[in-house]
Amino acid sequence: MQNQQSIQGMLSIGALICLAVGWFNLFSPEINHLLSGKVFYVLIGASFFVQAPLLTNKNFMYAMYVAAGICVVGAFLPEDSKLSVLKTIGLLGGVILSLSNRRR
């Protein structure tokens, strides 16, 4: 369990670095777009996938797998596609599921 949490943490940190690189335009526009628009969502999806078995509620676990898949699939959809919004929906869904699973 601790190993899964470490992997999930590293994936999340990597995703945040990709997002920051894109925001601050540290590289060429193509690389910035690739990191913040594609790699970010793939890493977040992978993070959600690793986190899913750690959720206590089985319904949340399955929903987290769906959110992970949506993030990854959405990252590879063309930007001009109406379905490209799926990656953001997957991201929001995963964050909500993650926050709702926290102990109070």
Image (tube, rainbow, N blue to C red):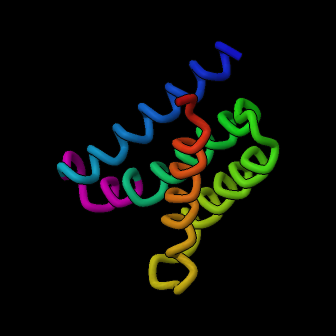
Q: Nearer the viewer, residue 63 or 6?
A: 63
Instruction: Identify which residue is drawn at 57% across, 44% down.
Output: 100
Q: Position of residue 41 (x, y in %)?
A: 51, 53
- Describe residue 1's horizontal placement relative to residue 91 as left or right: right
Instruction: Identify which residue is drawn at 69% across, 49% down.
Output: 64
Instruction: Identify which residue is drawn at 35% across, 60% down.
Output: 33
* Quadrant into which the N terminus falls: top right
Q: Nearer the viewer, residue 27 or 15?
A: 15
Q: Which residues are magenta?
A: 25-34
Q: Residue 99, can we see it? A: yes
Instruction: Identify which residue is drawn at 57% across, 72% down.
Output: 77
User: As drawn, which residue projects farthest toward the top?
Assistant: 2
Please tell me in which quadrant of the rendered image residue 66 appears.
Answer: bottom right
- Describe residue 98's horizontal placement relative to residue 66 as left or right: left
Residue 8, placed above or below residue 63: above
Residue 49, placed above or below residue 91: above
Q: Position of residue 18 (x, y in %)?
A: 37, 44
Please tell me in which quadrant of the rendered image residue 37 appears.
Answer: bottom left
Give the overall secondary structure of the magenta segment: helix
The question of residue 26 being in magenta is answered with: yes
Q: Position of residue 93 (x, y in %)?
A: 57, 58
Q: Residue 43, can we see it? A: no
The question of residue 12 being in magenta is answered with: no
Q: Position of residue 16 (x, y in %)?
A: 37, 40
Please tell me in which quadrant of the rendered image residue 86 appears.
Answer: bottom right
Residue 13, placed above or below residue 88: above
User: As drawn, which residue projects farthest toward the front?
Assistant: 104
